[in-house]
Image: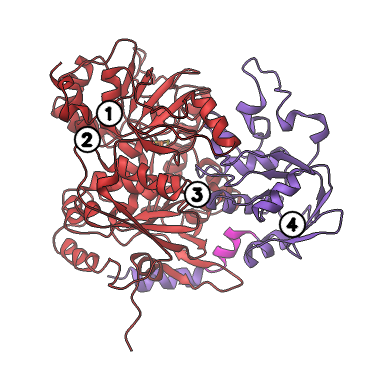
Chain colours: A purple, B red
Amino acid sequence: MTASNASGFPVRSASVVLAQTNIDTDQIIPARFLSTTERRGLGQHAFNDWRWREDGSANPDFAFNQPHNAGRSVLLAGRNFGCGSSREHAPWSLRDLGLQVVVSSEIADIFRGNALKNGLLPVVLPEAVVQDLMTRPDDVLTVDIEARELRTPDGTVHTFPLDAFARTCLLEGVDEMGYLLARSAGIQHYEDTHHAR
Amino acid sequence: MTASPKTLFDKLWDAHVVIPETEAAPAVLYIDLHLIHEVTSPQAFTELRARGLKPRRPDRTKATMDHSTPTLPAGPDGRLPYASEASEKQVATLARNCAEFGIELFDMSSDQRGIVHVIAPEQGFTLPGMTIVCGDSHTSTHGAFGSLAFGIGTSEVGNVLATQCLLQRRAKTMSITVDGALAPGVGAKDVILHAIGVIGVNGGTGHVIEYRGSTIEAMDMEQRMTLCNMSIEAGARAGMVAPDEVTFDWIARTPRGPKGADFDAAVAHWRTLRSDEGARFDVEVHIDAADIRPTLTWGTHPGTAIGVDVPVPAPVDAAERKGQDYMRVVAGQPLAGMPVDVVFVGSCTNGRLRDMREVADVLRAHRVAPGVRMLVVPGSEIVKREAEAEGIDAIVRAAGAEWREPGCSMCIAMNGDLVAPGQLAVSTSNRNFEGRQGPGARTLLASPTTAAWAAVRGVVADPRERFSDHREVA
Ligand code: SF4
């Protein structure tokens, strides 16, 4: 989907830290908020059960409720972020919350794919690097898709893997459905040769 | 020159490549069967409409409603007790989308409706050799038939609706070989929980798992579906089992599978769908069936699996400590003996006839312990009818448990069936994440036998007691 892809990179932002490992998509957006037929408006429920108390008030201990984290668009998360369900509502809610980049030492497959389709960049770096970044969340990081680099203010450069196709899509705003539609002739040929029985 | 030996995954992948992958772009992969449900499809249809498109192959698309549907019957006014207006609207939206675009829908009035991963194999839509996707991570279930089946996001649901194709990078391969006989009271759910415990909650990331070995070959289709279902809980893209006579027998009995000469021709092809002798996997794991005990989870992800009588390990990091605090388990003590509030039997993992029978086996001679709420939710209308024909509903009710209408129910707690804050549930579903079964709910994943035995004992207990000890006659 094209909506938000091309804009916004490189990102320059300090980070919000959620050090916990295995943050699953049920934590990112609990199932009871999936009864929507829209993509928008899920940001208020991102990390809902950690963010809001039962009486509806904000949990002051939770990172996203702390005033100094307001407006930050990079999330530093513990290993195996985004495991669990295939709900695209997870990256929708994180984008709606204002995030553009998630950094972790491991990011679950389906979440990673869903994130890329919504202009949320998954950045996988070695665990030691992520741990180190977590000790300095106020550093303004530069996340550069073109160079596949995350740069810290002291000049350290961390390159991260990014699929060439995903990179092109993010940079040029190419959308996958359009790309596939443009290959209709090939798809027709496949159907003709494989299903003609 | 002989071709190098291929894995089952390689064969399925190669047969579905429309345009091969390159450094610059993923492969265009053809999808044979697209399953949709109410929760992850509405925005995809919106996108289709916005672009003025129609589904390319509505005939290869099947729809059901399962996640947010009530499991209680309609009230006196004939209305179904939906948990919210939003849920009802979501279900209605699916019905409208299917009607507009000519997609076959198993709706609330259908006597074949049920959880998407239960009904597609039941109908004979799921066949060996297929690529199958659904906006649902447990699509891996269908791999039990020797298909390449995996979960996708809503944007991809839109892509498949529009083009019947997906952009995919080839996955790595992993084999999990299980050999030997399972002990009485130990089943497929214990095998997969044990396996996830061995490889870890992210141990399968980037891989497609093929389950093999004598233990797997001895399993029926329902057990193989339980196994493949939870592949995603190890982070794997998909799980699969090579098709064999057991698979063909199942398909022969389905209403919509191939018939007559078509069936015979299909079987001849399906027999070629196995990993060649000498095929190499990127990762190979071996498990001895004799090592597998009745297994449950102690933490807040499915990788925290241990034998029922094994002490909970000391936490290795802050996340595990948080998980143990949330679950209120004590390191050094086994799960056996923990008092249970709720027992849930159902879901696409364990909501099939075999699972209902396992529960009835336990409940036939016992009552649910006082203070325990037990919900038994068949995975489909067909499972429900077949179970009722065997009197299982009566056994369940007589034991003091609830027998419900088919749906996802307490597995995802979207439909109003939920575990109260702080309560401990032993569940046959697939996820024990914080709040998965309701805010503050604590979930232990287990087999139907272990779950039913916990309901009877009122505490987590070793179901092997039934085969060795006096309690069975008590
Ligand atoms: S039963 Fe649970 S895991 Fe299976 S499809 Fe329904 S919600 Fe998903």
Q: How many marks?
A: 4
The residue carrying mark 2 is: B185
Closer mark to the observer between disc 1 and disc 2: 1
The residue carrying mark 3 is: B202
Q: Of the numbered discs in the image, which one, if any, rests on residue B462?
A: 1
Q: Is A182 colored magenta in this rendering? A: yes
Location of the N terminus of chain B by quadrant is: bottom left
Task: Name which residue type carries label 4.
Answer: Ala
Real-space Cα separation, disc 2 to disc 4, in angstroms: 55 Å
Q: In the image, is residue B193 above or below residue B433?
A: below
Parent chain of label 2: B
Q: Would you say the residues marked 1 and 4 are in contact, meaning their CB atoms lie under 8 Å apart?
A: no
The residue carrying mark 4 is: A6
In front of the other: B32 or A188: B32
Residue B471 shows in the view: yes
Location of the C terminus of chain B by quadrant is: top left
Closer mark to the observer between disc 1 and disc 4: 1
Q: Which residues are magenta?
A: A175-183
Toward the right, the furthest residue is A154
